[in-house]
Structures are given as structure tokens and as C-alpha cells.
Amino acid sequence: MLKNKVIIIPIENAWNHSADFLRQTALVLSKHNLVYIYDHNNHYFFGKKNRKNVYPTYKNIIFHQAKYYLPFERFKIIDKFNRWLSFKLFLEKHRRADKILWIFYPNYYDFAQMNSQKMLKIYDCVDYSENHQEENILINSVDYFFVNSKALKNLYTKRELNKQAIYISAQGFFQPDDKKIKSVPLKKGKNKVVIGYIGGLNYRLNYPLLDQLISNHPEWLFVFYGPEQNNVEKDKVYHTQKWIKKLKQHKNTLFSYSSDRYFIYGLIKNFDVAIIPYNTDIIFNKYCYPMKIFEYFYMGKPVVTNPIVELNLQKFNNLIKISKENNDWEKNIEYFLKNKLSAQKKQVQKTLAKNNSWEYKLNAIGKYLLLN
């Protein structure tokens, strides 16, 4: 495990975003290091103090809101200079610290191009990026480039880059304290089975598939537990809000959301079958590695999913069913309803989940950095 470092993590989405890889990484690293969450998106002009954000408080985590110095930031050249100057001054302030710049998002490639004494730069790639130009610059600018799946590693070998992706065999998921998992009663009606999904409700879901399943099986209760997330550009293409509204009109659906992880694990207990109904025509989905698979596994649930490349690995055999066509979904859900997972398979699931915890992943990265 890394110790006594100053770790700088540029943040892109909200701190409490449902895809919480950045937050979980920061929380684990902060146990033995000082972590700065560098918030550029909520930057403020130094003369307007009332624009400062209020951030949550954690031990060994400091939120740094970027400060702009030149006016007229609406002009791209001035905005670019302010962005560069703000981060440069931040690095200068910490020039004597033993630092790691930990980047998740390719749009911070310009930060990786800056040099500072005693600073290591890494790209922690957790998802496929559509912006190859920025990502290529980022990869060529960092010292180390990590990926969390074999699917991504194989994909990056096809690109002309000055370094190879380093595969870390752990996805990262929040491993709960079993004693804290809450009891969540679910009003599901007499004899209804529960088909459950946890995660963001966004353009990534295969809504025509879900609408068909829900319509064909009024005897199943479909639970969707996660926040509605907007993406202006993608939502126009996939009509996300229209589809969510349509799904909510079905009597055998339940929608809700809580950020309480222990409540969510308690909810998963109610699932008879857990699902990952992604639209894998979207290349981002095809090459993703959903952490929810291990949340489902930890609770011993069978999983039905669309064909995600990483989930074809042998270790997932007999624990999940991959559905290539819409009709396969009904067959695979019905299979798991009739054929419950054995205690042995549930133990295999739990072991897989534990081997993909955030601690496991970050220990692996830490060991690699210390040995190289």
C-alpha cells in the first residue's frame, strides 16, 4: 500500500456520483496518504470569494477549488491559460512533497504534460474513452498507465502508444461490513419474483429490451434502484427520459434511490435475479467492466447481462448468463428462477468479489509502483 504521499486527483463528476470509483479510490488512499481532490470544473475568479464551494469533510482528504486569475474566461485562450496557471501554482505550492498525480479522465491530459519535482503521474483507466486524441496524449505523458480489465488491455494493444497498458486484475468495488447491511423489506406482492438492477438510469440502458421484458412478465417485479442521470447529447439520441417515463408507467416496476451503500446491499438481498441490461451497441458499454457485478456477487445473486466483453472470461462461467438476443433474456432469467445457485457457487462469487475490492486493487497498484 502507498504511504506518506501527496496524491492529487482531478475530479470530473460530482463527489457523490453513483459511479464512485474516484471517491472510493480517494477514501482508501487517504488512510495512509494526504489526498487532494482538485476541482477545476467549479473554479472561481479570485476576486469573487462568494463563489467558493462547500465540500464534505474527511480525514486526510482536502478539496481544492481551482482559482482563476485573468478575467474574460469566456475566451478559450484565456480559459486555457487560467487552467494551466491555476494548476501550475498548485503544484508549485507542493513542490517539495512526494506527489502522485492520479488521473481518471482523459480531458486532464494537459495536467499530465506539466512537470514538477518529485511527482509521479499515472492514468488509472476504468472505462473506454471515445476521445482517443486526448487519451493518447495523456497515455504518452504519464509514467504509468493502468487498466482494470483484459478487454481494455487488448483494445489498447491495437493503438500506437509509447507505453503498454498495465493490467491490474481487480475492478474495484465497495466491500461492506456484513453486520452493517440493512434489512430492506420490499412490497413485492404475492408470489412475485424480483428482477433487480442497481446503478444509474441513463442512456446506457437497453430500454426497448426492458420495456419488452416488463410487458411480457407482469408476474415479475422489476426494481430499478439508482439516480436518473442526464447527458444532453446522448439523451437526444437515445430518448432516455421518454423511455424512463414509459417504464415507470408499468405497474410491475419500482423506482427509487439511496446513496446509502448498506441500504443498497440490503435491497439486493431481495433480488431473485440481478440484471445488467446495457445497450452493447454502444461501444462504451461493450468494453465496460461494471462494478455492480461484484456487488451482486457479494450478495450471492445470479446475474443476467448483455454481451460485455470482459464478462466472457472463464471465471464468470456458471455464475452469469450472457444474453445476445432479447429472447435470450427471458430464457436466462427463467433458468435462474428454476435453478438456484448452490452454496458452493455463491462462495465462489463472494471470493471473486473480495478479490476485486478497492483495497485489493490499490494494493496491487501500490506494489507495482514501489517495485518499478
Image (spheres, rainbow, N blue to C red):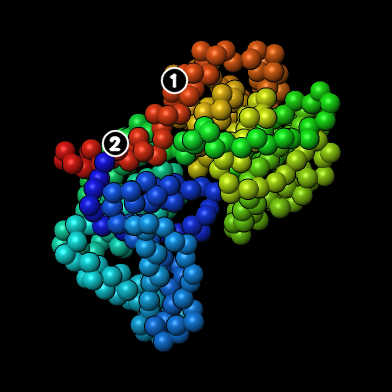
- In the displayed structure, 121 sits above or below 219; it is below
> Would you say 236 lies left or right of 137 here?
right
Q: Is 357 in front, or is 196?
A: 357
**Quadrant placement of the N terminus:** top left
Residue receiving disc 2: 364
Q: Earlier in the sequence, mark 2 or mark 1?
A: 1
Residue 2 % position (x, y): 25, 45
Q: Is 168 in front, or is 364?
A: 364
Q: Residue at x 24, y 64 (%)?
A: 114
Query: Is residue 368 shown to the viewer in this render?
Result: yes
Q: Residue at x 49, y 82 (%)?
A: 50
Residue receiving disc 1: 315
Marks 2/1: CA–CA distance: 20 Å
Secondary structure category for the residue under label 1: helix
Query: Is residue 13 shown to the viewer in this render?
Result: no
Name the amino acid type tagged 2.
Ala
Residue 354 % position (x, y): 42, 29
Q: Residue at x 41, y 43 (%)?
A: 126
- In the displayed structure, 267 sits above or below 98; it is above
Secondary structure category for the residue under label 2: helix
> Would you say 269 lies left or right of 125 here?
right
